[in-house]
Amino acid sequence: MRYSYLLLIACLFACSQKNETSISSWRLIDYKVSYYDTITGQKVYEERPDMLKEYDGIMIVDNEIQFVNKVLSKKANHIKILEDDTTKPFLRLLSYSGYVQQSEILIKWETAVEHRISHFELYVSHDGKEFVFLDKILAEGGTSRMNYVCIDKNPKPGINYYQLYCVDVSGEKVVSNIIAINYSIGNVNKLINDGERIYLPFAIGDFYPVSVIYKNDHEMLWEGMKRDVRFYDSKQEVKTGNKKLEMKFTR
């Protein structure tokens, strides 16, 4: 009887371990695209495209890639004025983030001080360039911490970009950071393992497939190769060669 009881406990523990969610967060610390001469195999030059910065700050949850609160541009987070000047608007934005909740995307922000602030406006884009109005939320005003939530009830599959505006009583607007939230349906972003390698389920630029290489528990590489591409060398002469994508992450 005692043996059966211990066996049951062991089975329950094993099942709980099996169902435990695996979560890891990664930061992009280096990235580049290198161009190589086909004949000599030598590197001609390398570049660091800004679009690769969009992959900074990812999570891998049970082998699914999640893009969480990626900051794509850095702009003023608050209006700076002298604290004793009570005639001008003042706002201190403490946080601005978003996440997926079932079929919606929730955008949240927190303020500490609001003086002569009228309201907030949230805009959404599906290409990171053209933004359309999503919602307007009145400012609460005051000096204590205030929390706001805006819900996008109709996000599109893929990357959704959000930009927050603070509008003062005179109508002047101050823009905050752009964040991007990836909204996927089903297992769109599941890492693919074909038995020989692990690779991303999506392209990065014109690189596909992109392999995922775990160097150790704290380092991960994404690598992709595109062959027979045409590019200009340092002398502005057209060459045909290969280009290689390299992205290094740490946790």
Image: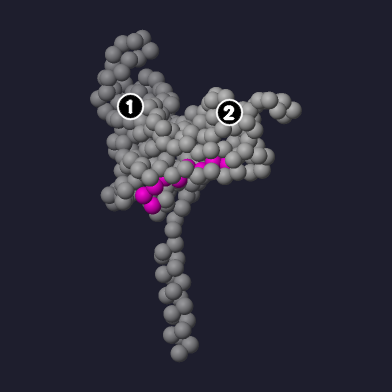
**Residue 126 as seen in the image, left or right of residue 240:** right
Residue at the location (54% across, 43% down)? 148
Tell which residue pokes out farthest to the left in this image. Answer: 228
Of 128 and 149, the residue lying toward us: 149
Q: Report the span colored magenta.
A: 102-110
Identify the secondary structure beneath mark 2. loop
- How crowded is the residue under tag 1: few (<14 C-alpha within 10 Å), some, or many (20+)? many
Using the image, tell me which numbered label, if any, was put on residue 243.
Answer: 1
Name the N-terminal-most of marks 1 and 2.
Answer: 2
Task: Provide the residue designation for mark 2.
Answer: 169
Q: Quadrant of residue 95?
A: top right
- Residue type at mark 1 is Lys
- Residue type at mark 2 is Val
| Foreground disc of the pair 1, 2 | 2
Of 40 and 81, the residue lying toward us: 81
- The reply to whether residue 111 is in sight is yes
Query: How many numbered dots are placed on residues in this image?
Result: 2
